[in-house]
Structures are given as structure tokens and as C-alpha cells.
């Protein structure tokens, strides 16, 4: 009986570990619905968010939104798109600000707050959990 309980606990733990790696949320890179850009690549988004490019590929200055530190969408974005950890990103922006080469994106808040911000800013680029996408915004890239 005790062996069965241990096996059940082990299987439950294994399932949670697998889900932690596989059950991550899909991200949507979003813009204002009137944005003329048809789509962006992962590389383009990374370059824009790291201030290596300040315009959309078809022209037009980009205004970036970020989510609060520690939010699930932000963790996924930093990991999947920027290929960094939170501490690395913080160090990166400290150097960029100190050298005058860039400023970090505006921190807006939650997925819903980001959507509202994007609607108000025609030059915007942001990210949200893909499950929050609706017809008020334009999706330029889905990141699995």
C-alpha cells in the first residue's frame, strides 16, 4: 500500500515537471490594428526590444510596452524572444541607459492593460498571452 502511494506521488511529480516544460503559454506580439506591418519575425522583435532597431521594418518609429517584472508573459517573453534571464536583461538595460544608447520599454502592466495601451498608441508594439488576443489588436507574431 505504501509503495503504491509513493509511486502515485512520483508519477504526479513527474507529470508536474513535464507540464512545467510543455505547458507554457503561447505569446502574441501585438500592435495597433492600423499598423501597416503584415508580420514580424522573432529576430526583428528581438532587435526592436533590445533597441538595436528603433523602427518597424516598413518604417515608422516603434513605441514599446513591457509587462511588470515577474509576470508570466514577461518571463516567457524574456526567455523565448530575448533569449535572456531577468537579471541579464536588467544588466543590459543598465548599460544601455548609462551609455546613452537606449532606454527600456515602458512598463504598462497586465495583458489587459497592455491591450488598452496598444489601442491608444498607433506606433505601439507589445506582447501578451496569446489567449488574450481579440479583434481590438493586431497580431504580428505568435511565439509558441
Image (spheres, rainbow, N blue to C red):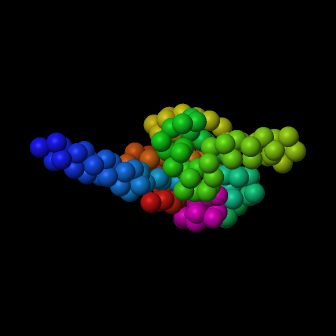
- Residue at 49% x, 35% y: name it: 110
Residue under the image location 68 percent in, 46 percent down: 89
In this view, which residue lies farthest toward the right? Answer: 99
What are the residue bounds of the magenta stretch?
30-46
As drawn, which residue projects farthest toward the left? 1
Residue at left offset 64%, top offset 58%: 46
Q: Is residue 17 left or right of residue 108?
A: left
Q: Position of residue 35 (x, y in %)?
A: 57, 55
Relative to the observer, which residue lies in front, 53 or 46? 46
Q: Quick check: is 36 in the magenta stretch?
A: yes
Considering the image in quadrants, where does the N terminus appear? top left
**Position of 144 compared to 47: left or right?**
left
The vertical placement of 42 against 126, above or below, is below
So how many labels did they put on this image? 0
Q: Which of these two is toward me, 53 or 120?
A: 53
Residue 1 visible in rendering: yes
The quarter of the picture where residue 48 lies is bottom right
Between residues 57 and 48, which one lies in front from this camera angle? 48
Q: Residue at x 48, y 59 (%)?
A: 143
Q: Does the magenta segment cover residue 79?
A: no
Please provide percent x and percent y for residue 19.
35, 52
* Image x and y of residue 117, in percent: 55, 38
Residue 59 locus on image (x, y percent): 70, 61
Residue occupying the far front of the picture: 2
Q: Quadrant of residue 5?
A: top left
- Can you see residue 120? no
Question: If the image is split into quadrants, where does the C terminus sit?
Answer: bottom left
38 over 6 or under it: above or below: below
Decide which of 50, 75 is in the foreground and name it: 75
Vertical placement of residue 51 versus 119, above or below: below
Amino acid at each position: 500500500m505504501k509503495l503504491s502511494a509513493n509511486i502515485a506521488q512520483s508519477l504526479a511529480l513527474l507529470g508536474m515537471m513535464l507540464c512545467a516544460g510543455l505547458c507554457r503559454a503561447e505569446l502574441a506580439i501585438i500592435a495597433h490594428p492600423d499598423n501597416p506591418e503584415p508580420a514580424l519575425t522573432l529576430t526583428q522583435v528581438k532587435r526592436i526590444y533590445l533597441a538595436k532597431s528603433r523602427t518597424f521594418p516598413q518604417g515608422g518609429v516603434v513605441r514599446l510596452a513591457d509587462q511588470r517584472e515577474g509576470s508570466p508573459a514577461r518571463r516567457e517573453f524574456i526567455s523565448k524572444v530575448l533569449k535572456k534571464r531577468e537579471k541579464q536583461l536588467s544588466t543590459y538595460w543598465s548599460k544601455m541607459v548609462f551609455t546613452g544608447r537606449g532606454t527600456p520599454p515602458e512598463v504598462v502592466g497586465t495583458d489587459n492593460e497592455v491591450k488598452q495601451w496598444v489601442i491608444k498608441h498607433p506606433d505601439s508594439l507589445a506582447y501578451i498571452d496569446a489567449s488574450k488576443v481579440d479583434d481590438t489588436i493586431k497580431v504580428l507574431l505568435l511565439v509558441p
